[in-house]
Amino acid sequence: MAVTVVVALLLLATSPAFMASASSPVPAAAGGSPSVPAGPLDIVQLGAKGDGKSDATQAILKAWKNACDATGTQKITIPAGNFLTGALELAGPCKSSIIIRLDGNLLGTGDLNAYKKNWIEIQNVDNLSINGHGTIDGQGPLVWKNNECQRSYNCKILPNSLVLDFVKNAQIRGITLLNSKFFHMNIFSSQNVLVDKVTIKAPGDSPNTDGIHIGDSTNVTITGTTIGVGDDCISIGPGSKMIRVHGVHCGPGHGISVGSLGRYKDEKDVEDVKVTDCTLVGTSNGLRIKSYEDSKSSPKASKFLYEGVTMDNVSYPIIIDQKYCPNNICVKSGASKVAVSDVIFRNIHGTSNTPEAVTLSCANNLPCQGVQLVNVDIKYNKSNNKTMAVCKNVAGKSIGVAKELACL
Ligand SMILES: *[C@@H]1O[C@H](CO)[C@@H](O)[C@H](O)[C@H]1NC(C)=O
Ligand SMILES: *[C@@H]1O[C@H](CO)[C@@H](O)[C@H](O)[C@H]1NC(C)=O
Ligand SMILES: *[C@@H]1O[C@H](CO)[C@@H](O)[C@H](O)[C@H]1NC(C)=O
Ligand SMILES: *[C@@H]1O[C@H](CO)[C@@H](O)[C@H](O)[C@H]1NC(C)=O
Ligand SMILES: *[C@@H]1O[C@H](CO)[C@@H](O)[C@H](O)[C@H]1NC(C)=O
């Protein structure tokens, strides 16, 4: 079958009639035969040099255009080598399904003038796969000093490394993301996205280098992935639904967080999040739901299951914080507008680095509802204090939990 297709393509490719029809808009046949792209899909054939110095931006943009204008499944190749680039805005809609095979290293230039917003931004694409053993290296150390977000609430945001906007049916597998300038990955307004066996790495003290941020997206699954960064390993923002996080190792970092919620007007609800079989090592938070105390909108956060999570030396392993106000840059009103309900923590074990193994800090005007602690066994294992739960304005129940943590 495959052989027949290849032979047919070779014949067709040399036929002038076919070349003409390939460049005119042919309706995409889903899973149908691929057309011959208008030019190469290997970035080296398009002039990219893997010397770490030459600018490969145009070659990659051309490969994208060649793939996007063809039909069927088209595969862009980024072979071994170090390819320096500026902004890569890879926009659809495409007539084809696109595979980006990444075996080389992409290096994001340290020249911030080369970016409008993000570094690699894929928009309006249906059926995308990025896989290989290569690296997306944001070269963050060159620009982290320009980050002002620790000091100012409305700071200028540095380029995120890999952004999916309005993408449907995507798989990102096997690659490494290294030292992003801002977030490593941002999945926005997308559906049916799988991130599998990806490695994300930046120093524990690098600013805002979140591993994977998700917003306004449905059905995003992250499996078998290792994340060590300077901010949240995974952050699940407003409008996220059907999020599955399974077999993720996090640390260093700020943990697996929902939020921050309520920062902006018109935020949508977060619901149906499952975090299972994960490990957190040396992170500042473990499993966290955070919303701004002075929230500008009132999204609901509901239906969370955290199950089978191991904590090793985590500062705040379980934390719901309806009074989040980092660096005191918001107005402390005392009244939350973000309702948190139906949150189950089941089979959570390990050690904490502060006495507060469980912190459920909800607002008195809007108590958290339906929170369950089931077989939660976390110990503060230093001798200068004892393990405790600090719980305020929260309703629910504790089952199979030692007395010092059974605050519900
Ligand atoms: C994406 O894949 C689905 C299922 O195979 C197909 O129906 C759809 O047409 C494809 N879209 C594109 C742009 O290839
Ligand atoms: C969710 O996304 C996965 C791909 O990650 C897909 O296989 C599955 O069918 C999707 N589920 C729904 C309900 O759309
Ligand atoms: C525990 O974490 C703290 C702070 O995150 C760190 O300073 C300390 O070295 C860690 N302890 C161990 C035993 O790893
Ligand atoms: C604390 O727990 C770690 C493992 O998480 C262990 O290596 C260490 O010995 C423990 N310390 C004490 C004082 O129990
Ligand atoms: C034990 O930890 C709690 C919570 O962090 C703190 O409020 C308290 O002062 C500590 N007690 C001692 C004796 O350090």
Image (tube, helix red, strand yellow):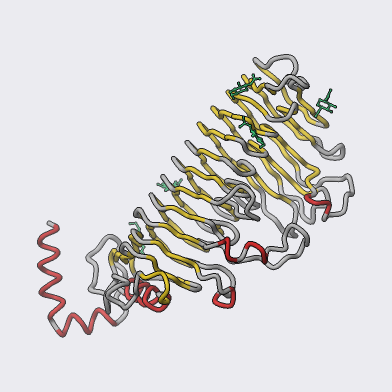
* 357 left or right, relative to 392: left
On screen, residue 42 above or below 369: below
- Of the pair 237 and 300, the residue shown nearer to us: 237
**x%, y% of residue 365?**
86, 40
Q: How many marks?
A: 0
* 174 left or right, relative to 323: left
Residue 408 in view here: no
- For the N terminus, the image quarter is bottom left
- Residue at screen point 51% across, 38% down: 249
* 271 left or right, relative to 370: left
**x%, y% of residue 331?**
87, 54
**x%, y% of residue 286?**
64, 36
- Of the pair 365 and 327, the residue shown nearer to us: 327
**x%, y% of residue 57?**
43, 75
- For the C terminus, the image quarter is top right
On screen, residue 23 above or below 50: below
- The quarter of the displayed image where residue 3 is located: bottom left
- Of the pair 69 and 179, the residue shown nearer to us: 179
On screen, residue 45 above or below 213: below
